[in-house]
Image (cartoon, grey):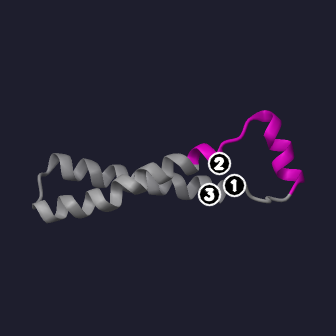
Amino acid sequence: MKKLELASYFMFAISVIGIVYALIFNPASWIVYGISIVSIPLFLLSLGLLTMAKSTKEEEDERTNEPFIGY
């Protein structure tokens, strides 16, 4: 789960940097379209993965003792 959380934070940072770059530096329109097509879904995906990676105190014991079987 730590790898998932670390990867999610990395994707979150990359997407935020891309979105902020497109907002502040006003690049050409094709670059803005490319950033929006990639960065906005990546931003939403990373938020979802971060939510899944965090567990409550009750779930921590279950996650370490039982294998992951999916949802």
- Quarter containing the C terminus: bottom right
**Mark 3 = which residue?**
4
Q: Are marks 1 and 3 in contact (CB under 8 Å)?
A: yes
**Residue 50, position in %: x, y?**
57, 47
The CA span between labels 1 and 3 is 5 Å
Residue at (30% x, 60% y) in the render: 37
Q: Are marks 3 and 2 in contact (CB under 8 Å)?
A: yes
Residue at (20% x, 52% y) in the render: 22
Residue at (15% x, 65% y) in the render: 30
The CA span between labels 1 and 2 is 6 Å
Image mark for residue 65: none
**Mark 1 = which residue?**
1
SS for callout 2 = helix
The CA span between labels 3 and 2 is 7 Å
For marks 3 and 2 on the same chain, the one whose residue lies earlier in the sequence: 3
Residue at (64% x, 59% y) in the render: 3
- Quarter containing the N terminus: bottom right
SS for callout 1 = loop
**Mark 2 = which residue?**
53
Which amino acid, mark 2? Answer: Ala
Q: Residue furthest front?
A: 71
**Residue 45, position in %: x, y?**
48, 53
Question: Is 58 covered by the magenta stretch?
Answer: yes
SS for callout 3 = helix
Which amino acid, mark 1? Answer: Met
Q: Which residues are magenta?
A: 50-66
Mark 2 Cα-neighbour bin, 10 Å: few <14, some 14–19, many ≥20: some
**In which quadrant of the rendered view does residue 69 lie?**
bottom right
Question: Is 26 covered by the magenta stretch?
Answer: no
Q: Are marks 1 and 2 in contact (CB under 8 Å)?
A: yes
Q: Decide whether the magenta segment is chiefly helix, strand or loop.
A: helix
